[in-house]
Image: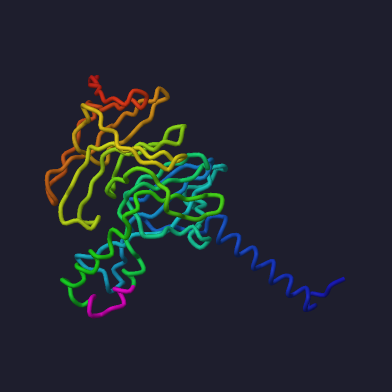
Amino acid sequence: MYSLWNPKLKLLIKVIFFVIVFIRNNVTGNFIPEGRAGQEAILIGTQLYFMGGSRTIPSSIPIKSNIRSYNLSDEVFFLDLSNTFSTNNPPFVDLSDAGARMKFGNEKGSAVFGGPNQEVYLVGGTQQNLALLNKDDQNITITSNQTLMIEEIFNTYNATDQMIFRYRPASRNWSPFGQGVLGTQPTRRRSTSTVIDQNGIIYIFGGRIEFDMFSHTLILYNELYTFDTTLTKWDKIDAVNAPSTRSHATPILLPSGKILYIGGVTQSAPGITTNLLPMTEIPVFDTISSTWSSKIIALIC
C-alpha cells in the first residue's frame, strides 16, 4: 500500500493534476475568444469553426489611437454542438496552438466546406501580415509618427495575392494552392458571395476592393468566377444579364442548382454611405444552364 508521502505516488498525483488542468483548458471550453467582427464561420459535422476576424485594441495598449482601433486575428477555434451547453460558458476549443493558426490575419472572407477531400476553402478577404505589423509596433519611430504609422499599417495589408487557401480539419493545417492551378485567378477581393456545390465547384460572385485591400480606390464587382476543387481550375462565367455590382449579398444554393443572391450593398466612392439593395429583387444564377435571371418578390402586408 502506497503512503501519501511516497515520492512515486506524489509524482503520479502531480501528473494526473497536470493532465486534468490541460484538458480543462484545452478541451472543455475554458478558452474564451475575444469579441470580434468579420470572422469566417463554417459548420463541419457538429463542430462550428470560427476563423480570423477583427478585434478591438484595448485602451490600455499604447498603440491604440484614432487611426488604429483594431487588429486582425489569425486564430482558429470551434464550438462543439454535439452536446448541450450553457450559453454562459460555451465550450470553445482553441486550435491556434495546434498548428491551425492562419497564415495571415484575416477578415471578411468566405468559407465553404466540401470538395474531393472534404476541406475548408477560405475565399478572399482582407489579409494582414501580422509579423510585419508586430515589428512595426516595436518601432517607436513609427508608433510616434501618425503619418508614418498610417503608411506602415497600409503596407501590412494585402499580404498575398492568393485568392484561396484550404484548411484540412483532420491534420489542422493551412496551405495555399501552388503550382498546377489552371485558368486565371480573379483579383483578390473581399465580402464576396460564395457557395460550393456537391461536385466541389465553388461559385464566387461580386465583392469589393478598398483601403484594407491595399487599394486607394473602391472597386465593386459583378463578376462570377468558379473554382473546380477537383481539377484546381479557375473559370470566369461571362453570362448576359448579370446583376449590378455589389458586395455582402447572401448566396443560397438550391437543390435545383440555382443560386439566389439576396440583399447586399453597393457604393459609389470610399467614405460615401453604402446603398442597401432591395430584398424584393433577387438575382438568380442557374448553374446548369449558366444563365442569369431575376425574381421580384411581392410584399405581403
Instruction: Answer yes or no: is residue 38 visible.
Output: yes
**x then y, percent, for residue 63:** 27, 72
Q: Main secondary structure of the magenta part?
A: helix
Nearer to us in this view, 117 or 138? 117
Residue visible at 45% across and 36% down? Answer: 200
Tell whether 188 sits left or right of 112. left
Residue visible at 42% across and 48% down? Answer: 180
Q: The N terminus is located in which quarter? A: bottom right
Instruction: Answer yes or no: is residue 301 visible.
Output: no
Residue 101 higher or lower than 2, as above or below: above
Q: The C terminus is located in which quarter? A: top left
Quadrant of residue 64 in the image?
Answer: bottom left
Residue visible at 28% across and 37% down? Answer: 249
**x then y, percent, for residue 29:** 53, 55
Q: Is residue 276 magenta?
A: no
Q: Specify the farthest residue to the right.
A: 1
Residues rendered magenta in the picture: 135-143
Residue visible at 61% across and 60% down? Answer: 23
Tell whether 19 sits left or right of 267. right
**x then y, percent, for residue 188:** 29, 50
Q: Is residue 139 magenta?
A: yes
Nearer to us in this view, 253 or 22? 253
**x then y, percent, for residue 291:** 29, 25
Tell whether 54 sits left or right of 168. left
Nearer to us in this view, 137 or 174? 174
User: How many tags in the picture?
Assistant: 0
Residue 206 higher or lower than 51, as above or below: above
Q: How is the image coloured?
A: rainbow
